[in-house]
Image (cartoon, rainbow, N blue to C red):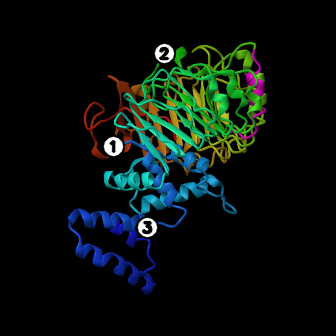
Amino acid sequence: MAIGGVLATKNWTNIREWGMLNHNLGPELDSNDKFGSMRIVLLLSFNDLPYYLKPCFLYLSIYPEDHLIERNTLIYRWITEGFVKQKEGRTVEDVAEGYLNELINRSLLHPVQYNDDGSMKLGRIHDLYRELILSKSRDDNFTATVNEQTTLWPEKTRRMSIHGTLGNLQVKRSATKLRSFLTFGVSRSTVLIMHESSAWYLSLRNTSVRVLSRSIERLKQLEILDLKQTYVTELPVEILKLENLRLLVYSHVSYSYLPYNCSPGFKALRGFGTLRALQKLVYIEATPGSDILREVGMLSELRRLCILKLRKEDGRTVCSSIVKLRKLESLNLKSLEEHEILDISYMSSPPPLLQRLYLTGRIVKFPRIHWRGTTLEQGKFQKLKLLNLDKWEGLRRVTIKEGAIPHLEKMVIQRCTLLESVPIGIECLLSLKILEFFDMSDEFIMTLRPDKLGADSWKVSHIPEVYYTYWRDGCWMVHSLKEKCNNQISSHSGAVTRTYGRRNSL
């Protein structure tokens, strides 16, 4: 597979290029044993990489063995490290995604889970390649990996990755050359920030960390702070001194239905509006009496925003701030309590680049539309790719005007118990790839099944994937409407897919 990945990149008309490959590879394979030959092939794959891909590939050595690598996280890390340069007519994120696809095409990174658009969501590097890049990274002082077998603390490394416990290793605070500090499976409740470190990236993801040290203010160059799947609930005020911070990532989310008011987030600090470089701010809690909702409108670079514990009286302020976020692509708003009104009626004009919209709460009035039903009008959501409607108890009908959401790729309707039918106009959504219903009534599902003469089955016949899903016994029970109809089986028999991962996202 490694040789195939190299051959796939060669110009088949360039005889000189093929001759050089044969000259370098042939004698090595003839003169080495099985394992020596394997290493030669792996080295050939690495040496054949263009200059811009080599640091990106070496960077994968920071991950533990068999670790699942998240696409978005990896792309942000590459960008922060300076491996990716913007090209004319393309964003730096687009360039980084191109690099990722090149590694996949060369079989150096293997996708194990895909997004709805076919891009990699999670991937893994082969153990043999990992051993190779670990060795090269160590020799070149590119990265340092610290685990319970480590006896000497790395002195001059730019990137440090800690795996699990540190055993009896004495941690030194001086690491002035350190640029990235990542942890995997660390169980300490607090983390000491390196003295005078100029790190760009700090990841405490998937650790039991509960308190973030106030010495984080020393990380003047920090751009990304990843607290995902930690137990941190409050941030030290010193974080406001990190003027270069672009991404603040937090979540500690179960995939099941949590009690409504148990949505975990963190308390936002007064003065957050000074962090003007922020592009991602997720799972912050709206605090009564604070100015955080007004300050959100000052973060003009935001691409993704999630606010929890909103009250009815927050509606005017939060909408006023959101309409100022012209670069916003993903928006998630959730009310304080299940029956608390989520007032978005003041959102006169949604952000023009909005692609993902999550609204959770009691919505009695959509912008300019009174609620028993809602209408998505032309020109409102031109970039929207994902629409998720969850537990809107008063919702009886949805009407989609032609041209309202022309690029929608996925629609999720979840726990809308009074909804009478699929959205009117859904048959005009030609870009729609996935339609999924969560915990809807049997009567509603029957209207979609052509084998049961469902009245609305023709409206969804053009959609490649239609599912109805239920949360049962700690996992999602996923039924494919298309497969069920093809097999002509009853609603209580046939194959059912069980899954534990998040399904209601793009």
* Contact between labelled residues 2 and 3, with CB atoms less than 8 Å apart: no
> What residue range appears in magenta?
290-302
Q: Considering the numbered disc 3 on the image, is that residue within a helix, a strand or a loop?
A: helix
Above or below, 201 against 361 in this view is: below
The residue to which callout 3 is attached is 47
Residue 253 in sight here? yes
What amino acid does circle 2 point to? Pro
Find residue 326 and report its image quarter. top right
Choose mark 3 or mark 2, whichever is in front.
Answer: 3
Q: Position of residue 231 (x, y in %)?
A: 50, 21
Report how far apart the C-alphas of labels 1 and 2 lie in the structure.
35 Å
Closer to the chain start, of discs 1 and 2, is: 2
- Residue 90 in the image: above or below residue 304: below
Q: Which residue is mark 2?
A: 259
- Say which of 425 and 166 sits in front: 166
Using a 10 Å C-alpha cutoff, classify the residue at mark 2 as few (fewer than 14 neighbours), some (14 to 19) or many (20 or more): few
Comparing labels 1 and 2, the label whose residue is closer to the camera: 2
**Residue type, label 1:** Cys
Q: Amino acid at mark 3?
A: Asn
* Depth check, front residue: 368 or 339: 339
Residue at which label 1 appears: 485
Q: Nearer the viewer, residue 454 or 199?
A: 199
Could you say whether the residue bearing mark 2 is in a helix, strand or loop?
A: loop
Left or right: 136 in relation to 360 = left
Chain-order first, disc 1 or disc 3: 3
Residue 307, horizontal then vertical, whole percent? 64, 25
490 vs 11: above or below: above
Q: CA distance from mark 1 to mark 3?
A: 51 Å
